[in-house]
Amino acid sequence: MRSPDPTCIRFALPIAAALLLAGCDPVINIAGANFPSWLFCAICGFILTVAIRPLFVVTRLEGYLWPRPIVYSSLAILMGCIVWLVFFNRI
């Protein structure tokens, strides 16, 4: 019997941890339907990014934001993380 491949073990441990920790995600009840909180944060991050874009246009900063898809997707992720910290931080 041969020993397991070290790369297999290296990838198996994070996958197992992610599967075990997935049950720790808070759930939001909206109109009787249960939604994971990360979905709420992702939608809020997208909405906040759409709301911030006119500020970049008015201040003429949008011309300096390049590449725009990466900038706006990073801003949406940042806004989603801020929403997570504000509403779901248990510290």
Image (cartoon, rainbow, N blue to C red):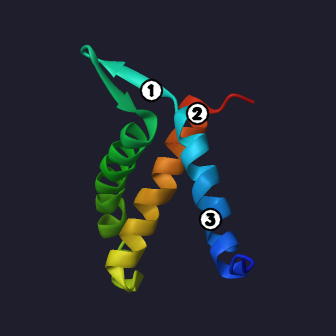
Mark 1 vs mark 2: in front: 2
Name the residue that disc number 2 marks: 24
Label 1 to label 3: alpha-carbon separation: 27 Å
Q: Is residue 40 above or below residue 72?
A: above
Nearer-N-terminus badge (1/3): 3
Label 3 to label 2: alpha-carbon separation: 20 Å
Mark 1 vs mark 3: in front: 3
Q: Quadrant of residue 39?
A: top left
Specify the amino acid type for callout 3.
Ala
Toward the front, the furthest residue is 1
Give the image location of residue 49, x and y in percent.
35, 56
On the rendered structure, is 12 left or right of 66? right
* Label 3 packing within 10 angstroms: few (<14), some (14-19), many (20+): few
Quarter of the image where the N terminus is located: bottom right
Give the image location of residue 76, x and y in percent.
41, 58
Name the residue that disc number 1 marks: 27
At x 67% / y 61%, what residue is drawn? 13
At x 75% / y 77%, what residue is drawn? 3
Residue 12 badge:
3
